[in-house]
Amino acid sequence: MVRGFWLEYPISVYHCFMSWLMPIIVSDEKAVDCYYRKHTGGRPANMENPQLFSEKLQWYKLYARKPLMEKVANKYTVREYIESVGYGYLLNDLLGVYKNVSEIDFNALPNQFVLKDTHGSGHNIIVKDKSQLCKWQAKMMMHTWLHQTIAWSGREWVYQSMPRHIIAEKYLEDETGELRDYKFYCFNGEPQFMQLEVGRGTEHNTRNFYDMDWNLMPFGKELPHNPNINVPRPQMYDEMQKIVRDLCKPFQYVRVDLYQVCGKIYFGELTFFPAGGAPDFVPVEYDTIVGEMWKLEKE
């Protein structure tokens, strides 16, 4: 069984319809304003002089529209950028690229692999044992992914015209039995802090933040930070920082995601609008503190 299928399908149909309708009836400015008010209890963003991190992300969606951002937000075409800056060796093995689900030959894939779309968020099918995969449900789910976009509601414009594919990649697992995701928040060409999620999908899920010297920072995102979780500094943390500095240079803000597996660093993705820019730091004053790290470049 593919978990979430029966919920995913009607939601995807709704997204298909709204992605066509919303750009026609609602301007980008109005959509961004509505999205922000929805997540702040009706408080509008200060778009003339944004100060909060969440406000600056709304401004970023509307006014910082470099073509390179669209290319690197795509989980397939970003590979060209990673190779162009000399980090092709960080890329996970690509097992297949598919324009539609009928092209997927499950017999040609190994026993363990990951399927994901190139244009969405959180759309992954992690296969640890191919014999347990319900292929028709997986295909139905991926079919709906190919007919939806996350661009319309909060106007994450990089996804609006993005080519849509399904990709298959090698299954990765680190020494903890999961795949820890090191998410570096970068402002004006420099990483400032890193988000690490532990126990994802369990009752012990924790989302902690660390500075560049691996000191635990006193805030979380959606979830409170947990000072009782003692995660040792990654063996390759300094090398990760060098890679991140090179990858983030063209952007005034980007989140760079990396993995570390068996002494090797892997590239994850580049993200410009985490959570659509919703203010979700815990405690809330860190929306202001993090916002101060970003010197907004109004071009």
Image: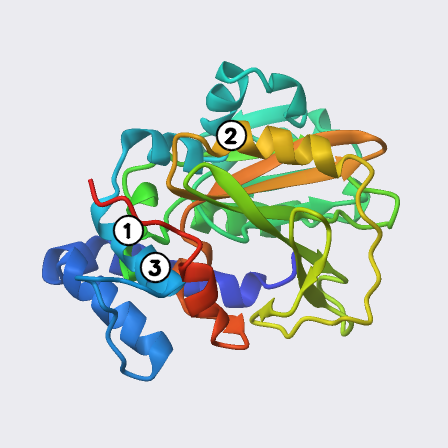
Disc 3, SS: helix
Which disc number belongs to residue 247? 2
Alpha-carbon distance for marks 2 and 1? 20 Å
Q: Which residue is drawn at 22% across and 53% down?
A: 20
> Are the residues tagged 2 and 3 within 8 Å (C-beta)?
no
* In this rendering, the label closer to the viewer, 2 or 3: 2
Vertical placement of residue 148 versus 107, above or below: below
Disc 1, SS: helix
Q: Is residue 190 rendered to the left or right of residue 45?
A: right
Q: Is residue 173 rendered to the left or right of residue 257?
A: right
- Taking depth in this image into account, of 132 and 224 the one nearest to the observer is 224
| Image coordinates for residue 215, horizontal then vertical, percent | 72, 56
| Image coordinates for residue 18, horizontal then vertical, percent | 26, 60
Residue most extreme to the bottom: 41
- Taking depth in this image into account, of 154 and 146 the one nearest to the observer is 154
Crowd rating for badge 2 (residues with CA inside 10 Å; few <14, some 14–19, many 20+):
many
Q: Is residue 138 rendered to the left or right of residue 290?
A: right
> Where is mark 1, residue-wise?
61
> Mark 1 or mark 2, which is nearer the start of the sequence?
1
Disc 2, SS: helix
Q: Is residue 242 rendered to the left or right of residue 83?
A: right
Alpha-carbon distance for marks 2 and 3? 32 Å
- Residue 103 visible here: no
